[in-house]
Image (cartoon, rainbow, N blue to C red):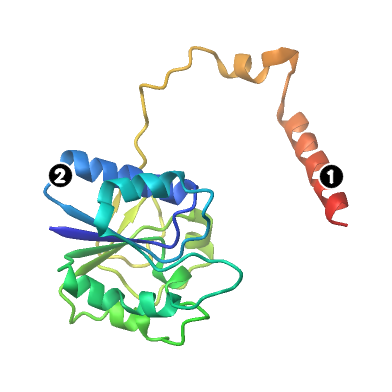
Amino acid sequence: MKVLFIPSHLSTSGMPQFLLKRIEAIQQYIPNIEIFVYEWEQQSIYYTIQRDKIVDIVRDNFYSCGYIRDGNSKGWAEKQNNIINYCYENKIDIIHIEDVAEYFINKDYNPNKNLLDDLYDPKHPWKIIETPHDHFKWINHTNKIYKPDGYAFVIDHSYEHNSDESAVISYPIDHSIICKKTREEILNEGGKTYDLKTYVNRFDDIKKSLTSVFE
């Protein structure tokens, strides 16, 4: 079986870390699955911790549509529009989109506005899975137009946009990381005591400082 992951980006953050852990788990427990990654946009050349690790794992099966810099989008659309050919050339069985397709597949700089229609066309041999990573946006601000074959949720969603097949695949807890200190001990280290009111006030001070800098 061949699985293609399509992340919107791989800059250091939660979704790329989740994808990295997902790939590592597949490699460890289902090694007969061949993994491919099609990075829709590279948004940073500095914050690449998870991206570098993913590239090391999948090697030649990694493909990037390009790095965003100075508003230069030359070549990005062509590479994104090549996704259908890429899937056929590599005989992809499952496409796993790491986010909601409507959020990022169609780009303003890409004149091809039929890309999602083409990707979700049932005539293709592959199945499509989506993983929403923004719970609030998914529940409150998502209008699903293109229906995947299933969802792999990171948490238990009560609102599933009429999906026929869905599963919750949560991020695994690393039980090897153990801290013997209590929450109160950690918060009070250095002789400082932080309660909710203190935290909110500190955050407000930071916000005011940033505002004055930009003004």
Residue located 31% across and 77% down the image: 82
**Residue 169 visible:** no
Residue located 46% across and 82% down the image: 110
- At which x and y percent is residue 23? 28, 47
Q: Is residue 78 above or below residue 56?
A: below
Which residue in the structure is indicated by mark 2?
A: 30
> On the rendered structure, is 119 left or right of 30?
right
Q: Is residue 214 above or below residue 126?
A: above
- At which x and y percent is residue 108? 52, 80
Work out which quarter of the rendered image holds the N terminus and state it: bottom left
Do the CB atoms of the residues marked 2 and 1 lie less than 8 Å apart? Answer: no
Q: Tell me where residue 61 sits by quadrant.
A: bottom left
Q: Is residue 212 above or below residue 171?
A: below
Check disc 2 and give the amino acid type: Ile
Q: Nearer the viewer, residue 109 or 201?
A: 109
Check disc 1 and give the amino acid type: Ser
Which residue in the structure is indicated by mark 1?
A: 209
Residue located 74% across and 17% down the image: 192
Q: Is residue 70 above or below residue 54?
A: below
Callout 2 secondary element:
loop
> On the rendered structure, is 131 left or right of 72?
left
Query: Total number of numbered labels?
Result: 2
**Residue 190 visible:** yes
